[in-house]
Image (tube, rainbow, N blue to C red):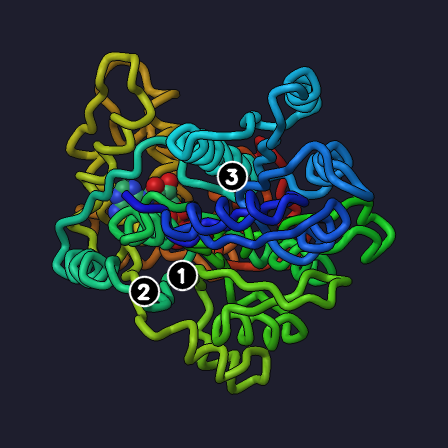
């Protein structure tokens, strides 16, 4: 397959060689920039991103080694390939020791040169993929198989499959734990960009002051901690997909820049003047109704229109209860790969189906994981399920009206028990618990204090 617009910088002082290289590479489909000395090359590297840099070793003013050093320090993904005469092979080997990807001796054969470039590009893509995986962004762990037969859920999947191969921006709405990231990933995997990076940013997990530099990168010295240039996620995602999770939490101050980027594909690094370009498809997710945020002047309407060209609404789990048994069994299988398969007793399934699942599929996954680990034997029954307010969710088949009324409890008590149950289920991981409960961390702390909840007091 012909490469699509991958960028190559050529730095060589011999005009004939420079031009023939440019022609060869342009015909191959690369976007080529030529420079005639090291200073020009560094100037270009400062303002544009290149996938490969072909650097002549001997150049006036600043030689190829200097440029190589610059690339090493400032352009982590650019692959430098040295161009050298036969007599300088020793120098070329030294350049490789210093981090050049490879070298080509002049006169070069077109075939050899193209092969080296293709390999260098592969390496660059691998490096970027690595970076994508390393980024603290939460990627889906394990298999991303999607379970769901409910009509409402199938409708979602059908829509997702239909719009996946388009370039449209997608907005995924859904309560906490309904599978927003899973669907985002499904769209990405079924898109024409499936072999390009998928980069995720959780807009709620990064302070406002850092989000711009996370998204668009920064120049060296842009602020106190900016000791070196940093590529933004839009740059890393170039050609691929950018997943903006919890988009409803993105601050008003960054929204105009995001809007411009979506409209024009243009952005600037923090502290930089140059307008840079990147081509990404945007998928966003939120559990907030952004129309309300617009009404409250917390979200720009024009940005919302750009983001939700296609809207996918994920139904909460309580509205597709028929999927609960299959999901539960799937989670057992997912967690217990190496052990004997456990199965759910019918009383356990009964309890699971009756429960309302405020934390949706994520909560179900956590409850099942815990039960699968803690239960003895091969059967998981109702008593193994650490569900909050279990007594209320269990079938109350016996007893007359009067005794049922006697068992009814005040709202506060339900709330207390529910908070405690979720916290215990999640081993007191408070940020996860807040998410599942759909409240802020601050509210959670207030409730813990108000109800004097303690670990192990369940
Ligand atoms: N239909 C499904 N089939 C299988 N697993 C699912 C399904 N829906 C969700 N899950 C699993 O449930 C967990 C939560 O899903 P996901 O992270 O996609 O939800 P979310 O809506 O992004 O949650 P949050 O609001 O907390 O960010 C994940 O482990 C995911 O794999
Ligand atoms: Mg999510």
Specify which label sits upstream in the sequence, 3 or 2.
3
On the question of residue 322 being in view, the answer is yes
Badge 1 element: strand
In this figure, what is the number of numbered marks? 3
Identified at 42% across, 44% down, the residue is 388
319, 103: nearer the viewer: 103
Asked if labels 1 and 3 touch by Cβ distance under 8 angstroms, the answer is no
Q: Which residue is mark 2?
A: 167
Identified at 68% across, 24% down, the residue is 95
Crowding at mark 3 (Cα within 10 Å: few <14, some 14-19, many 20+): some
| Residue at mark 1 to residue at mark 2: CA–CA distance | 6 Å
Residue extending farthest front: 16
Q: Which residue is mark 3?
A: 128
Specify which label sits upstream in the sequence, 1 or 2.
2
312, 42: nearer the viewer: 42
On the question of residue 426 being in view, the answer is no
Q: Which residue is mark 1?
A: 281
Identified at 22% across, 46% down, the residue is 353
Q: Is mark 3 within 8 Å of ligand 2?
A: no
């Amino acid at each position: 397959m012909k490469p699509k617009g991958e960028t190559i910088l050529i730095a060589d002082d011999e005009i004939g060689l420079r031009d023939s290289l440019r022609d060869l590479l342009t015909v191959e489909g690369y976007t080529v920039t030529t420079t005639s000395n090291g200073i020009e090359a560094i100037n270009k590297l400062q303002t544009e991103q290149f996938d490969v840099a072909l650097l002549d070793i001997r150049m006036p003013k600043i030689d190829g080694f200097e440029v190589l050093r610059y690339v090493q320090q400032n352009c982590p993904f650019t692959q430098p390939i040295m161009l050298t005469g036969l007599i300088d092979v020793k120098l070329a080997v030294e350049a490789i020791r210093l981090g050049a990807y490879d070298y080509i001796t002049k006169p070069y054969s077109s075939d050899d040169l193209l092969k080296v470039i293709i390999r260098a590009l592969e390496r660059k893509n691998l490096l970027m993929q690595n970076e994508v995986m390393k980024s603290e962004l939460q990627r889906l762990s394990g298999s991303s198989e999607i379970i769901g037969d409910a009509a409402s859920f199938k409708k979602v999947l059908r829509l997702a499959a239909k719009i996946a191969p388009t370039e449209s921006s997608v907005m995924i709405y859904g309560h906490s734990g309904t599978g927003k990231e899973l669907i985002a990933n499904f769209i990405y995997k079924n898109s024409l960009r499936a072999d390009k990076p998928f980069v995720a940013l959780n807009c709620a997990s990064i302070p406002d002051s850092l989000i711009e530099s996370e998204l668009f990168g920064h120049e060296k010295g842009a602020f106190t901690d900016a000791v070196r240039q940093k590529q933004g996620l839009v740059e890393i995602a170039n050609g691929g997909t950018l997943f903006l999770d919890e988009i409803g939490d993105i601050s008003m101050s960054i929204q105009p820049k995001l809007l411009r980027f979506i409209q024009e594909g243009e952005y600037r690094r923090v502290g930089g003047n140059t307008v840079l370009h990147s081509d990404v498809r945007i998928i966003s997710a939120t559990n907030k109704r952004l129309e309300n945020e617009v009404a409250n002047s917390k979200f720009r309407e024009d940005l919302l229109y750009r983001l939700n060209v296609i809207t996918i609404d994920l139904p909460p789990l309580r509205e597709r209860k028929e999927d609960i048994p299959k999901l539960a069994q799937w989670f057992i299988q997912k967690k217990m790969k190496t052990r004997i398969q456990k199965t759910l007793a019918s009383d356990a399934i009964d309890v699971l189906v009756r429960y309302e699942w405020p934390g949706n599929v994520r909560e179900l996954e956590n409850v099942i994981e815990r039960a699968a680990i803690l239960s003895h034997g091969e059967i998981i029954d109702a008593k193994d399920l650490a569900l909050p307010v279990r007594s209320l969710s269990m079938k109350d088949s016996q007893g007359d009206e009067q005794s049922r009324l006697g068992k009814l409890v005040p709202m506060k008590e339900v709330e207390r028990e529910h908070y405690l149950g979720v916290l215990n289920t999640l081993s007191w991981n408070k940020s996860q618990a807040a998410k599942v409960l759909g409240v802020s961390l601050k509210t959670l702390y207030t409730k813990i204090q108000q109800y004097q909840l303690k670990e192990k007091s369940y």
